[in-house]
Image (cartoon, rainbow, N blue to C red):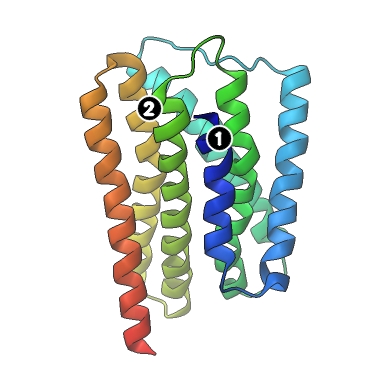
Amino acid sequence: MLLFLLLLMPLCLTAYCYNKEIRNVLPCLLLGFFISLIFCGFKSFFMYSHPVIFYSVAKTFSSIFVFQILLPVAILYGAFFFVSHDSLLFKSAAFVPLVMSFYAIFLPYMVISGTESIYSGFQILIKPVLYAAMIMQAGALLSSLFYALQIHSKRLFILNAFLVIVYLVSPAIIETIYLLSCNNFIVLILSAAYVFLVFFYLIIKRVVTRNKL
């Protein structure tokens, strides 16, 4: 089962980059892998790796969202966005290969280093799918967000910004429910709904884009 955890992100990256020019995605892939290796190496030597469950909804959610989603995504992509001198189109397209290549190492590291004995099905099966869907959805919404900036549409910008926040927050909410309630049925339903909505949005967006062309 660990193979699923280890291979899902690389396989998603391969599928995502299949029809793209290697020179456009390779620097982002290498940067994401390299930063993740450095971070995980530093964390393993100098920081406490085992997760702390607070038995408080707010504290558990905050711990998961801030340290596993918000800070990695915001710092990694934020630094890239402000340092890079490329166009908004390139920056939006770079989100998925950059962030997913980071999580290809970071996510297995979090799960393996944070488990003392038995791996749960959520950690090695559901969580990787949630994070892969989150990254794909955030990348798609980010391109719409930059498009709203270019056409100066305040409503479209606010809508996409709100959706980005919702999709980034949702995996942390689902994991909080799993850790504190251990209700597998609710977790499975929420996870399935989340992934379904992501794929439904991506399919609709692809169809709309093709019709415009």
Question: Toward which corner of the image does residue 72 lie, by quadrant?
Answer: top right
The residue at which mark 2 appears reads as: 175
Image height of 13 relative to 150, above or below: above
Query: Cα distance, mark 1 to mark 2?
Result: 21 Å
Residue neighbourhood size for the residue with mark 1, other residues' Cα within 10 Å, grouped as few (<14), some (14–19), many (≥20) = few
Of the residues shown, which amino acid type is indicated by label 1?
A: Leu
Location of residue 54 in the rendering, given as x and y in whole percent from the top left corner: 43, 10
Residue neighbourhood size for the residue with mark 2, other residues' Cα within 10 Å, grouped as few (<14), some (14–19), many (≥20) = many
Question: Toward which corner of the image does residue 92 lie, by quadrant?
Answer: bottom right
Q: Which residue is drawn at the image coordinates 43% and 48% (left, top)?
A: 134
Q: Nearer the viewer, residue 173 or 151?
A: 173
The residue at which mark 1 appears reads as: 3
Residue 11 seen from this side: yes
Of the two numbered discs 1 and 2 on the same chain, state the one appearing first in sequence. Answer: 1
Q: Is residue 177 left or right of residue 85?
A: left
Looking at the rendered structure, the secondary structure element under dot 1 is helix
Location of residue 108 in the rendering, given as x and y in whole percent from the top left corner: 59, 32
Image height of 28 relative to 129, above or below: below
Q: Which residue is drawn at the image coordinates 42% and 18% (left, top)?
A: 59
Q: Nearer the viewer, residue 93 or 6?
A: 6
Numbered circle sitting on residue 102: none
Of the residues shown, which amino acid type is indicated by label 2?
A: Glu
